[in-house]
Structures are given as C-alpha cells and as structure tokens.
C-alpha cells in the first residue's frame, strides 16, 4: 500500500454523475478529478483505480473486497448518498481506506414532504386533483380539515423524526414521539413510554425508524388496530417495516382515513418499470416512488458534504463522521508536520510510534489517538524536520495499516 505524502497530487475518480459542486471543491484544492456519469463494473473499476487516491460513488457502484484489495493507491472512498450497503466496509477498514457518506444531507427534504403530505391527506388533495383532471368539479368542504391542533405521533426520533417535530409544531401540531432510545424532546414534544401509548393518542402516525433487521414487519395488523378511528398513516422510512396488506384492510374498512407511502417492500429496479402494490387505486392514499429525500438541494448538499470530508481527511487526517475509522479531529497548528498512522488495534502501538519519534530526536507537539473495532488511528504533530528513515520505520511497524504524512 502506498503512503500519501504532502507532495502527492491527489487524484480522484468520481462516478455516477456526482454533483458538479464536488468536482469544483476538489479541483479548487489542486486535485486532479476524473468524472463519469455512469457506474463501473468490478473489473473496469479495478483498472481505473490505478493511481487513484479517492473514489466517489453513489448507490450503483459496488466497492467489493476484491476492488478494495486491488487498489493499493486508494486512501478514501466517498459514498455520495446516504446508504453504504454497496461498500464492503470490513474490507475497506482492513485496507485502511476511510469511508464517508452524507447521513443527513436529505433530512430536510424528507421532512418537507411529510408536512406536505399531512396537509394533503387532510384536504384530500390527491383525490381532488385527480377528479379535476377527469373534468369533475367537486367543490365541497366535506371530509376536508385543517391540521392545526392535531396530534402527530412520530415513531423514530432520529435525524428526520426530530426535525419533523420542530417544523410540525410551527404548523400547530401537537407532537409526541416514541423511540427505542431516550431522546431529547425538542420544543414542546413529549416522549411516549411505549408504542401502544403513542398509537392510542395520535391522529397522525408517521414512521421514521431505521432499517435494522428487527424492524422488519414491525408495523402490522396489531399496530393499525391500535390507531384511533379516522387517523392517518405515513411511512417514508423503509418499505419492509410495514405490512401493506394490513394497511389496505384498515383503509378499506374506513378505520384509517388516508395514508402516504413513499417506500415499499418491493420496489421496481429502474425508472419506467411497473410498480405493483396492493395500495394502488385506493382513495386518499398518496403513493410516491421513494423520493422523500430526492431534491436538487439534497444532491447539492451531498456533493459539498462528502467532498468536504474527503478533502479534510486527505489534508488534515480528519475522520469526523467517518463510517468505518476511529473519529478524530485535531486542530491544525501552523509550522507543524502531521503524521496520520492507521494501525491494528493491539496494545503498545502508541508507545512504539513515540519510541521511533524519540529515537529520531523528534518531539511531539500534539497527538490524538482513537480506536474503533480492529483499528487504531493516531494523529501526531511534530515541528522538526524529519529524516526519511523515520517514515520508513513507522511504515515498517508490523501493526501499521497505513501511514500518511499530511503536511
Ligand atoms: P436515524 O438513524 O437518525 O433515526 C432513526 C431513529 O429510529 C433512531 O432514533 C432509532 O433509535 C429509532 N428506532 C429504530 N428502531 C425503532 C423502533 N422499532 N421503534 C422506535 N424507534 C426506533 O435515521 P434518519 O436519518 O432519521 O432516517 C429515518 C429513516 O428514513 C431511515 O430508515 C432512512 O433509511 C429513511 N430515509 C428515507 C428517505 C426517503 O427517500 N424516503 C430518505 C432518507 C432517509
């Protein structure tokens, strides 16, 4: 594996039509950036990674163990999206490749759609618009309501759930939430002690849980039955958490007054493919093709966010919000050199690193160590000029995974 030094001109390969803002940001740092609109298959990707330090992908390029093992120059991988399922994270860690993603760049987009849908459900906007397109002028207030004062029950009070809480209160909704973890209740929101409590006292139930395996089918017949007569249901989290057959029954019986669903247990592979669901054709049911987070603003934000993380890693060794490495952030001090040493997390490595520095008569000006799983990561700032042997000695430690001399 190569060592990245301060003199190295960084080369990046960005695939899958990553936002132009990311290219601009990295080029403004003096990097050479190649970009492609498409995803690359395994063999082509391996060929293209020769001499590439940083790879940017979205969801379609698979960063497999084989790819990562055959890319000795690669030091960082940016997933310009939210999920990282397309990356073999364990192989990335073994190779000392830092992985970054954009965990909250589309949070606001999802929240805005949820709010739009809550209002739309209470005004039956989908049905009214559909009738107008068919030439039917159905001017009536029956079945249309304001949302002000209604009780919003949020299940999963993470990034999306908590931001929804804040904006929903501004609309006059009374917010309560249920989360498996204790969460800080924002504004006037109230945490419910159980899912049952939340379901019994919410006019609107909206799911924002994560995709952990235990959440598969977590919302079905029992949970729908606990919701009050005439309530609304939304799911913009994961398709597999909801039993759609049970949802259909509760809509058909009139127990639920409407639903908005953005994610499905089975989603078509590509644009234009037929969408199949038992929820098609139902009144006051808003169906959207997994677009909760899909806005141009979110794409721009993802580009800036991930490119910024890749730049900070290559220039400062910063691993804040890294998906796989120990998270370290050490403020830069003028006039120092910084060494970033990634190693196997076994006892005594820090002593060995500092022993080598001491042997070369080099004083440590600043140092930060973090560990995560099988990896340890230490950032060390030194003032003195150093001999090339010092770098070699650090590289030659049996525990060394990667060494970068950053500035
Ligand atoms: P997050 O990890 O910040 O929050 C998830 C929260 O759910 C956590 O607080 C967790 O403790 C809680 N939780 C998990 N299981 C639970 C359970 N069974 N009951 C109660 N609480 C539970 O995630 P986030 O960024 O807020 O995203 C939420 C969901 O939205 C994720 O599933 C994500 O994939 C999805 N999402 C969808 C879109 C879209 O386009 N529709 C876009 C972005 C995110």
Image (cartoon, helix red, strand yellow):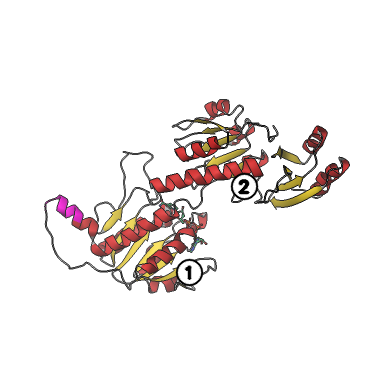
**Residue 6 appears in the picture as rendered:** yes
Quadrant, the N terminus:
top right
- Residue 277 pos. (x, y %): 31, 49
**Front position in the image: 8 or 392:** 8
Q: Residue at x 57, y 33 (%)?
A: 31
Label 1 vs label 2: CA separation? 30 Å
Quarter residue 126 falls in: bottom left
Label 2: few (<14), some (14–19) or many (≥20) C-alpha neighbours in 10 Å: some
Q: Quadrant of residue 388?
A: top right
- Asked whether, in this view, residue 323 is left or right of residue 267, the answer is right
Q: Give the main secondary structure, helix, strand or loop, of the magenta stretch.
A: helix
Asked if residue 148 is among those painted magenta in the image, a careful observer would answer no
Range covered by the magenta-colored residues? 129-135
What residue do we see at 33% from left, 72% from top?
Answer: 150
Q: Please state the horizontal and vertical placement of residue 147, each as a whole percent of the image.
A: 30, 68
Residue under pointer 2: 324
Q: Which mark is residue 186?
A: 1
Circles 1 and 2: CB distance less than 8 Å?
A: no
């Amino acid at each position: 594996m190569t060592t990245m030094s301060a003199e190295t001109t960084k080369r990046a390969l960005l695939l899958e039509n990553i936002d132009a803002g990311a290219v601009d940001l990295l080029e403004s740092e003096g990097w050479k950036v190649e970009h492609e609109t498409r995803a690359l298959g395994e063999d082509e990707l391996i060929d293209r990674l020769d001499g590439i330090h940083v790879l940017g992908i979205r969801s379609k390029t698979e960063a497999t163990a084989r790819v990562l093992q055959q890319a000795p120059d690669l030091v960082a991988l940016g997933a310009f999206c939210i999920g990282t399922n397309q990356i073999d994270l364990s192989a990335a860690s073994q190779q000392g490749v830092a992985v970054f993603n954009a965990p909250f760049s589309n949070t606001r987009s999802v929240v805005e759609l949820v709010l739009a849908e809550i209002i739309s459900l209470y005004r039956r906007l989908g049905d009214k618009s559909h009738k107008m397109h068919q030439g039917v002028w159905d001017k009536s207030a029956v079945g249309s309501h304001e949302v002000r004062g209604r009780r919003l029950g949020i299940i999963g009070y993470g990034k999306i759930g908590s931001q929804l809480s804040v904006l929903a209160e501004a609309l006059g909704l009374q917010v309560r939430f249920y989360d498996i973890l204790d969460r800080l209740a924002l504004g006037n929101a109230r945490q419910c002690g159980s899912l049952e409590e939340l379901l019994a006292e919410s006019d609107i139930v909206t799911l924002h849980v994560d995709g952990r395996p235990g959440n598969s089918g977590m919302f079905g017949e029992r949970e729908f039955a606990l919701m009050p007569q005439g309530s609304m249901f939304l799911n913009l989290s994961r398709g597999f958490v909801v039993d759609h057959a049970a949802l259909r029954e509760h809509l058909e019986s009139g127990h639920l007054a409407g639903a908005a669903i953005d994610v499905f247990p089975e989603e078509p592979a590509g644009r234009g493919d037929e969408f199949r669901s038992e929820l098609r054709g139902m009144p006051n049911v808003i169906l959207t093709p997994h677009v909760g987070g899909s806005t141009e603003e979110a794409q721009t934000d993802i580009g800036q966010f991930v490119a910024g993380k890749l730049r900070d890693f290559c220039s400062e060794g910063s691993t804040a919000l890294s998906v796989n490495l120990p998270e370290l952030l050490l403020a830069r001090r003028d006039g120092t050199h910084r060494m970033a040493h990634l190693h196997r997390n076994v006892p005594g490595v820090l002593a060995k690193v500092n022993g080598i520095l001491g042997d070369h008569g080099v004083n440590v000006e600043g140092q930060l160590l973090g560990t995560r799983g099988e990896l340890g990561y230490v950032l060390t700032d030194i003032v003195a000029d150093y001999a090339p042997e010092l770098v070699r000695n650090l590289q030659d430690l049996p525990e060394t995974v990667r060494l970068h001399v950053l500035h």
